[in-house]
Amino acid sequence: MDDKFWRLIHDIPVTMLTTEDADGTLRSRPMVAHQTQFDGDLWLFTRAGSPKTDEVARHHQVNLSFTEPARQTYVSVSGWAELVRDGGKIRQLWSDALSKWFPRGPDDPDLALLRVRVEHAECWDSTASAMIQAYSAAKAGGDPGSADKPGRTSIH
């Protein structure tokens, strides 16, 4: 995964996580993706006992949507999620800003992480910034005519 992907999403504080419930209905909710770098995984804080963790346990495929209207940037991420109960990783990713949602802090026994292993990402920039166009063209072998639609790129 290219770091152009990370540059597009790292300043977007909230993502919409979409999962599938027991009857196949898609459910979305806002989440905070909290990390300082991207290594192929995105990390979300959650309660271990929440309905979304049951949904992820049944059906691991999820979608994350990142939107930044001021920059006209939109990113859709598909991947595989799993619940992670690793106190060390929780403390590594923890920031005091998370206390708003998790007032018992990083040692809360119900606190967990969802790790989303990114499989595919699509990015749209309606201003068709040079970075997006250049990456689209490079991905298509340097021929801008064979790239994704202008202002949109797929990152695999």
Image: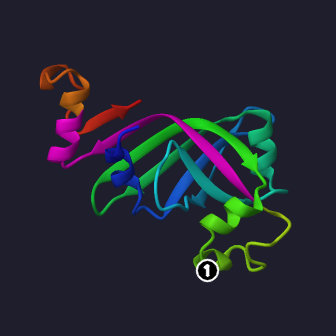
Farthest residue, direction front: 88
Q: Position of residue 87 (x, y in %)?
A: 76, 62
- Name which residue type carries label 1: Asp
Residue 128 shows in the view = no
Residue at numbered disc 1: 96
Q: Position of residue 102 (x, y in %)?
A: 72, 74
- Residue 108 is covered by the magenta coloring: no
Image quarter in which the C terminus is found: top left
Q: In this view, does 114 lie to the left or right of 132?
A: right
Which residues make up the magenta segment?
Answer: 112-135
> Could you tell me which residue is drawn at 35 percent across and 32 percent down?
154
Please indicate, yes or no, whether residue 85 appears anywhere in the rendered image. yes
Q: Quadrant of the N terminus?
A: top left
Residue toward you, 89 or 29: 89
SS for callout 1: helix
> Counting other residues with Cα less than 10 Å from the Cα at mark 1, is it few (<14), some (14-19), or many (20 or more)?
few
* Residue at the image position 78 percent from the left and 54 percent from the top: 85
Left or right for 24, reference 131? right
Q: State the image coordinates of residue 140 (x, y, percent, origin top left).
A: 23, 22
Q: Where is residue 145 drawn, in percent x and y?
A: 13, 22
**Hey, which quadrant is residue 48 in on the image?**
bottom right
| Residue at 39% across, 36% down | 122
The image quadrant that residue 47 belongs to is bottom right
Q: Residue at x 14, y 26 (%)?
A: 144
* Membership of 132 in magenta stretch: yes
